[in-house]
Amino acid sequence: MSDGDDVDRLLIVFGGVLLSAVLGVALFIVVPGSLTELFGVVLTLVVIGFGARGASRLADSMFPDYNAAEVAVEGPITRDGSTPGPLPGAGGATADDVVEQIERADEDEAADALLMKLDTPGGAVVPSDDIRRAAADFDGPTVAYATDVCASGGYWIASGCDELWARRGSIVGSIGVIGSRVNVSELADELGVSYERFAAGKYKDAGTPLKELSVDEREYLQGLIDGFYDDFVDRVAEGRGMDPEAIRDTEARVYLGNEAHELGLVDDIGDRGDVEDHVSDILETEVSVREFDPEQGLTDRLRGGATAVAYAFGAGVASVVGDDERGFRLRF
């Protein structure tokens, strides 16, 4: 971007702030004499803040100072960003938000390349696949890079990118699928709780935690796991240009970055700066990166905070009863 563009950007931002300041003073200080001066000043500052944000976005769209987008996937991958477990709470990577960020970057004419920052142990199958598909559909080179952890669902996402980089100490791999259920049948017996079945379909209640699995049910659920695993192996082998048997030979192990590189699971070793240099070589121009974050208004942020509190309070009980009607969970 030229020096002239820098000046134009500053003029737009300054003009937006000045206009917002004048409007705020007029609306909240000069006109309504009944309002206290302090309240008027506060509202004026709010208007100035929104004006500055809007002017900055306008300047970015008219005179972008970046040519590559970065989208991060951090924490366990779920549909809504909630973190399952014995101490559940809000957090993790919200798949719908990540997909929206990637799609927004794809529609941005200034973003010629996509960097996927991966620091995730994996998570839910379908949300992970949604992110992978969005990255694969990006119109331009996509380079994923691992920071601390790129395992399971994180590696699934990376397989949809053109390249994967990692640090020497990054944890990479865990190419596998896991299904789990809580078995509380013995505890139920001790408490005098019995399970009565009312279902249509032999396997409708397979995985219900209040009863023991039959041989047929165990084979059925294992078949689901095997099917997802076969798909995982095939997708990774295709994306990495590797023999599927080589992927199976990893047996869902995790590796340090340098080991993963030797096995062909990682394209190169380096940090974010090295990745930027590599993308510069691909684009044949100096790279400037803009981080794309979820677009959330004030209402969404307040709602998210309330949801986090409610989830932390109630999910512990729900996790004991079962997070779905089947009591069987499938994840990367």
Image (spheres, rainbow, N blue to C red):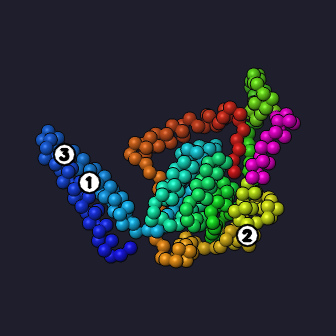
Name the residue that disc number 1 marks: 48
Q: CA distance from mark 1 to mark 3?
A: 12 Å
Name the residue that disc number 3 marks: 28
- Dot 3 falls on a residue whose secondary structure is helix
- Earlier in the chain: of badge 3 and badge 2, it is 3
* Contact (Cβ within 8 Å) of mark 3 with mark 2: no
Name the residue that disc number 2 marks: 264
Q: Main secondary structure of the magenta part?
A: helix
- Earlier in the chain: of badge 2 and badge 1, it is 1
- Amino acid type, callout 3: Phe
Seen as rendered, the residue at the extreme right is 215
Q: CA distance from mark 2 to mark 1?
A: 52 Å
> Would you identify the image quadrant in which residue 48 lies?
bottom left
Please check the rendered image and state whether residue 303 is part of the magenta-colored stretch, yes or no.
Answer: no
Please check the rendered image and state whether residue 230 is part of the magenta-colored stretch, yes or no.
Answer: yes
Residue at x 54%, y 52% (from the top left corner): 99
- Dot 2 falls on a residue whose secondary structure is loop
Magenta part of the protein: which range?
213-231
